[in-house]
């Protein structure tokens, strides 16, 4: 019995060795992101992208910024140390200032508008520059959702003036910090993985993220209200290293591209559904959810951007083209 068991165990071990050796023969596609594994972008990539490329690639995501710190992923790809990421336009704007057009408040109108913009020829020179100068390919656009203000305390926020003195956590790049100022708050840079503790200890008065993220990251446990400013219909680009891409056969490139598009679409639909559904969940958790004077926010944010140094970097005519693709 013992011997038989031993043999069976050895056979099982050699099978798993063979499997892992085979896995190593495949192209390794590591993705690093601060997103949690239950974030809808993560779920979509694991359920749709990984299986769709599994014939030739082993998709290995690392969530919660465990492989690379938030904001350092693009450089890691450029250096050949990482294969994939879920990059923000704000991160791309660090390298290419013109990407700040996609970081400006009240420019993108909806998930569909984001897709129309990403697939429009207006995007070609942006994509080309990222490939040529950073060695990164933007595969598809992923929907993160409408960013809302999520604050501690019972301050009534109707206009940007009501955010005066509010320490609002925004992610670490300049483009994000400017959005915080445009909203009327005092922006404070904090990495996503540290936001919960910063809220809990009172180091910050609030943060901004779509409602599904407020739920997924449990920010509702340490905040009291959500102000529905919808100031940024937020996106991420699913990226891959250009060298990795160029080493794929044409058939493999097609498989990666359609897997990326399929995952993005799946994640988008799930996130849109969650944005609707979860309003009642956060209310049940005791948070006050209300709409402020949206015209006041839109007016201030848009005029701050247009008067800023950011707008000077926007290629001529592109804002009009983006607007024309919306409603
Ligand atoms: C955040 O740090 O608030 C943010 O929402 C910014 C996004 O660009 C994106 O990186 C996201 O975090 C992470 O994926 C975690 O959800």
Image: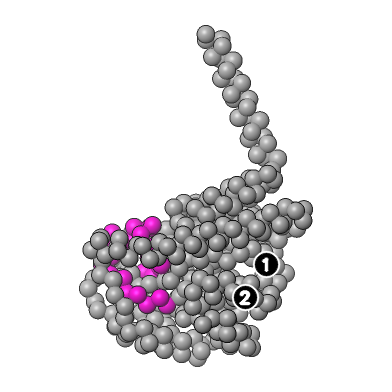
Give, as a single range, the part of the protein colored magenta. Answer: 205-231
Determine whether the residue tagged by mark 2 lies in a helix, strand or loop.
Answer: loop
Q: Nearer the viewer, residue 155 or 43?
A: 43
Check contact, mark 2 vs mark 1: CB within 8 A. Answer: yes
Residue at figure coordinates x 37%, y 77% from the top left: 229
Secondary element under disc 1, as helix, strand or loop, is: helix
Residue 324 location, quadrant: bottom right
Q: Quadrant of residue 14?
A: top right
Which residue in the protein does label 2 denote? 96
Few, some or many residues within 10 Å of mark 2 (<14, 14–19, 20+): some
Q: Where does the image place residue 92, in percent across and percent down from the top left?
A: 59, 71
Horizontal and vertical percent for residue 161?
31, 86
The answer to which of 153 and 46 lies nearer the viewer is 46
Q: Quadrant of residue 150?
A: bottom left
Residue at 52% in and 55% down: 44
The count of marks equals: 2
Q: How far across and down, in percent of the image, does residue 285 sit?
A: 25, 60
Q: Is residue 50 left or right of residue 132?
A: left
- Category of crowding for the residue at label 1, using alpha-carbon neighbours closer than 10 angstroms: few (below 14), some (14–19), many (at least 20): some
The residues tagged by marks 2 and 1 sit, at their Cα atoms, a distance apart of 10 Å
Q: Which residue does the image show at 58% across and 81% down from the upper left? A: 325
**Above or below: residue 110 compared with residue 4:** below
Say which label, 2 or 1, has the lower sequence index: 2
Q: Is residue 165 magenta?
A: no
- Which mark identifies residue 134? 1
Q: How far from the left and from the top, in percent, is residue 316?
A: 64, 88
Q: What residue is at 29 percent from the left and 83 percent from the top?
A: 158
């Amino acid at each position: 019995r013992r011997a038989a068991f031993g043999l069976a165990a050895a056979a099982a071990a050699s099978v798993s060795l063979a499997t892992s050796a085979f896995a190593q023969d495949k192209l390794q596609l590591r993705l690093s992101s601060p997103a949690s594994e239950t974030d809808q972008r993560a779920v979509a990539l694991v359920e749709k992208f990984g299986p769709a490329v599994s014939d030739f690639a082993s998709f290995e995501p690392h969530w919660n910024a465990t492989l690379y710190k938030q904001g350092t992923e693009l450089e890691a790809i450029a250096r050949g140390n990482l294969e994939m990421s879920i990059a923000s336009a704000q991160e791309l704007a660090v390298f290419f200032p013109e990407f700040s057009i996609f970081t400006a408040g009240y420019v993108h109108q909806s998930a569909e508008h984001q897709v129309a913009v990403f697939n429009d020829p207006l995007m070609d020179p942006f994509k080309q520059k990222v490939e040529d100068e950073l060695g990164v390919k933007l595969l598809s656009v992923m929907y993160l959702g409408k960013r809302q203000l999520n604050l501690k305390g019972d301050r009534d926020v109707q206009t940007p003036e009501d955010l005066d003195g509010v320490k609002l956590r925004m992610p670490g790049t300049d483009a994000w910090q400017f959005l915080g100022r445009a909203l009327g708050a005092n922006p404070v840079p904090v990495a996503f993985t540290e936001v919960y503790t910063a809220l809990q200890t009172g180091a910050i008065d609030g943060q901004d993220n779509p409602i599904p993220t407020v739920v997924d990251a449990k920010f509702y446990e340490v905040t009291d209200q959500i102000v529905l400013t919808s100031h940024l219909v937020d996106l991420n680009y699913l990226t891959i290293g250009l060298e990795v891409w160029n080493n794929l056969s044409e058939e493999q490139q097609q498989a990666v591209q359609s897997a990326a598009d399929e995952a993005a679409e799946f994640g988008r639909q799930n996130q849109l559904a969650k944005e609707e559904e979860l309003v009642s969940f956060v209310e049940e958790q005791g948070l006050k959810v209300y709409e402020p004077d949206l015209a006041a926010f839109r007016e201030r944010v848009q005029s701050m951007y247009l008067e800023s140094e950011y707008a000077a970097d926007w290629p001529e005519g592109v804002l009009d083209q983006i607007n024309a693709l919306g409603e």
